[in-house]
């Protein structure tokens, strides 16, 4: 079955962007209420729990990713029996994964307190809160989370995105009421568990409605099972490296610098996460379509599609980076009311924007790499990169002057990306699937995008900095100026490519 890439991508992008906008606005309001009603220590606790449980999510072992990627070919071949067999296998695995997460999480319970430097907020039982977060992490594995694979394999991520949008709005309205009326953190985290359950139940309901013929039954052939397990062995190494890179920062900051430092880092990193999420909506909406194209189109056709998509994403990344560099500090100042414990010097947002640009510039390549099931060739890359990141984290927070320790944590990740991960993954994709000539074409485009982003960022920052206003009025005026400058220059520079992409979408392949 050849899926309609453009049609599915368009509705996936719309649904995903809406979901990310909701995911941008409501968590921002949530962090603001935390700061005003509970204090930065509670934000630090939230960040710490997310990092710890992010490590536990490693128990998934990459089975979800491997199974969805394995489904692309039988979906392309319209082999429903094989898809059903994959789904049954996935269900069995996820039940074991949920059990493993609960077991390992309980074993870590006695050591949670050692990860917090200094005193806890009064009246809180760290172990009880950890247990509630642990239940929230594990419950999805027992409640039909595997059913989402059916939607993903058929390039219907818009269904899951719409469900997440609805449940996210309901969740945050509920927890806002809890924070305002009770200021009780226990009620807050228990409400999150309830909405996790609701999201899973709604997902399985829609998967059954849209694809009633896909049910978990049948026996997966031994060779298919072995292929999944082989992919998992490689994916687990990618996940270990990713967990080391993404979860170590908060734990290192908490252990060495304390919860207030975690909150300060979290505020700056939240901006990166929020903006990245909007861009992620675009390329993630293409993932399952790429998976179908790998099995239905030639490599030359797919390279053209990939480069067109990359050009669009590059324009979004450059514009976003320019807006961020111009507005980062004014925004943080207004958000935190210039709280000196949460405000950082200008080097911090510069490094955050550099991290944002470098990480986002590689994401479409990683998206295609995953869709093409290229896991084994660079399986050691994330381990090496994550180890470099963790080692530099510890060195920098130990030896740098106090005012630069937090910046050292950010810089560690940048070094890991630039020196280890990007060269490695680029080489793999352009030898395992595309060819080296296409690789040079891609690299020239990436370097050109980097140079353009530097120029655009400098022009936008200079324009916004010329505005002498402070506070919320200053932020609004600077934002308007930055939008006009960066948007206008981006529209001029990318006018031909963006017009071509719009025409291509309208023609609908």
Image (cartoon, rainbow, N blue to C red):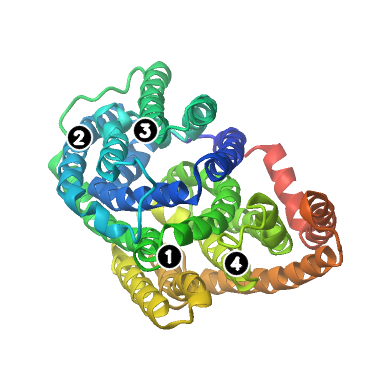
Tag on residue 186? 3
Cα–Cα span, label 3 and label 2:
36 Å
Instruction: Name the residue at 60% across, 53% down.
Output: 309
Using the image as rendered, state which of residue 479 and residue 39 is in the foreground: 39
Label 3 vs label 1, nearer the camera: 3
Q: Disc 1 designates what residue?
A: 429
Using the image as rendered, state which of residue 3 and residue 446 is in the foreground: 446
Q: Is residue 262 rendered to the left or right of residue 442?
A: left
Q: Earlier in the sequence, mark 3 or mark 2?
A: 2
Label 2 vs label 4, nearer the camera: 4
Cα–Cα span, label 2 and label 4:
49 Å
Q: Position of residue 336 (x, y in %)?
A: 63, 52
| Element type at mark 3 | helix
| Element type at mark 1 | helix
Using the image as rendered, state which of residue 228 and residue 503 is in the foreground: 228
Q: Position of residue 59 (x, y in %)?
A: 23, 48
Crowdedness of circle 4 by 10 Å Cα count: few (<14), some, many (20+)? many
Q: Disc 2 designates what residue?
A: 89
Cα–Cα span, label 2 and label 1:
29 Å
Using the image as rendered, state which of residue 413 and residue 474 is in the foreground: 474
| Element type at mark 2 | helix
């Amino acid at each position: 079955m050849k899926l309609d890439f453009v049609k599915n991508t368009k509705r996936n992008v719309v649904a995903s962007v809406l979901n990310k906008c909701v995911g941008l606005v409501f968590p921002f309001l949530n962090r603001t209420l935390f700061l005003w009603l509970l204090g930065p220590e509670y934000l630090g606790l939230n960040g710490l729990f997310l990092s710890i449980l992010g490590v536990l999510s490693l128990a998934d072992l990459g089975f979800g990713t491997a199974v969805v990627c394995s489904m692309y070919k039988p979906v392309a071949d319209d082999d429903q029996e094989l898809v059903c067999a994959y789904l049954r296998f996935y269900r069995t695995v996820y039940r074991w994964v949920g059990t493993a997460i609960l077991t390992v999480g309980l074993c870590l319970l006695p050591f949670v307190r050692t990860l917090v430097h200094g005193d806890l907020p009064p009246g809180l039982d760290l172990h009880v809160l950890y247990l509630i977060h642990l239940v929230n992490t594990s419950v999805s594995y027992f409640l039909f989370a595997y059913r989402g694979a059916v939607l993903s394999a058929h390039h219907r991520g818009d269904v899951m995105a719409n469900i997440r949008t609805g449940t996210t709005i309901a969740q945050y309205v509920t927890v806002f009421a809890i924070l305002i009326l009770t200021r009780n953190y226990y009620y807050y985290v228990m409400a999150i568990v309830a909405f996790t359950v609701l999201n899973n139940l709604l997902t399985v309901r829609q998967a059954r409605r849209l694809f009633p013929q896909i049910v978990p039954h049948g026996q997966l052939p031994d060779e298919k099972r072995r292929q999944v397990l082989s992919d998992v062995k490689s994916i687990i190494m990618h996940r270990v490296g990713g967990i080391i890179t993404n979860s170590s920062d908060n734990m290192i900051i908490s252990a060495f610098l304390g919860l207030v430092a975690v909150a300060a880092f979290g505020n700056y990193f939240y901006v990166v996460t929020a903006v990245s999420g909007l861009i992620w909506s675009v390329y993630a909406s293409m993932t399952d379509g790429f998976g179908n194209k790998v099995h239905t189109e030639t490599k030359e056709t797919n390279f053209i599609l990939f480069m067109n998509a990359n050009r669009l994403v590059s324009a979004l990344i450059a514009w976003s980076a320019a807006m961020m560099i111009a507005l980062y500090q004014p925004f943080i100042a207004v958000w935190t009311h210039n709280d000196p414990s949460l405000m950082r010097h200008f080097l911090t947002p510069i490094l955050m924007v550099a991290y944002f640009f470098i990480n986002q510039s590689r994401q479409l390549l990683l998206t295609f790499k995953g869709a093409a099931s290229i896991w084994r060739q660079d399986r050691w890359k994330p381990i090496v990169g994550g180890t470099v990141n963790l080692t530099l984290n510890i060195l920098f927070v130990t030896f740098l002057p106090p005012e630069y320790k937090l910046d050292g944590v950010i810089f560690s990740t940048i070094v890991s990306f630039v020196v280890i991960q990007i060269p490695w993954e680029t080489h793999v994709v352009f030898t395992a699937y595309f060819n080296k000539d296409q690789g040079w074409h891609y690299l020239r485009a990436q370097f050109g995008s980097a140079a353009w982003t530097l120029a655009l960022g400098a022009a936008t920052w200079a324009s916004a900095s010329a505005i002498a206003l402070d506070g919320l009025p200053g932020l609004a005026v600077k934002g308007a100026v930055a939008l006009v400058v960066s948007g206008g220059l981006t529209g001029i520079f990318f006018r031909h490519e963006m017009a071509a992409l719009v025409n291509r979408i309208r023609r609908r392949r």
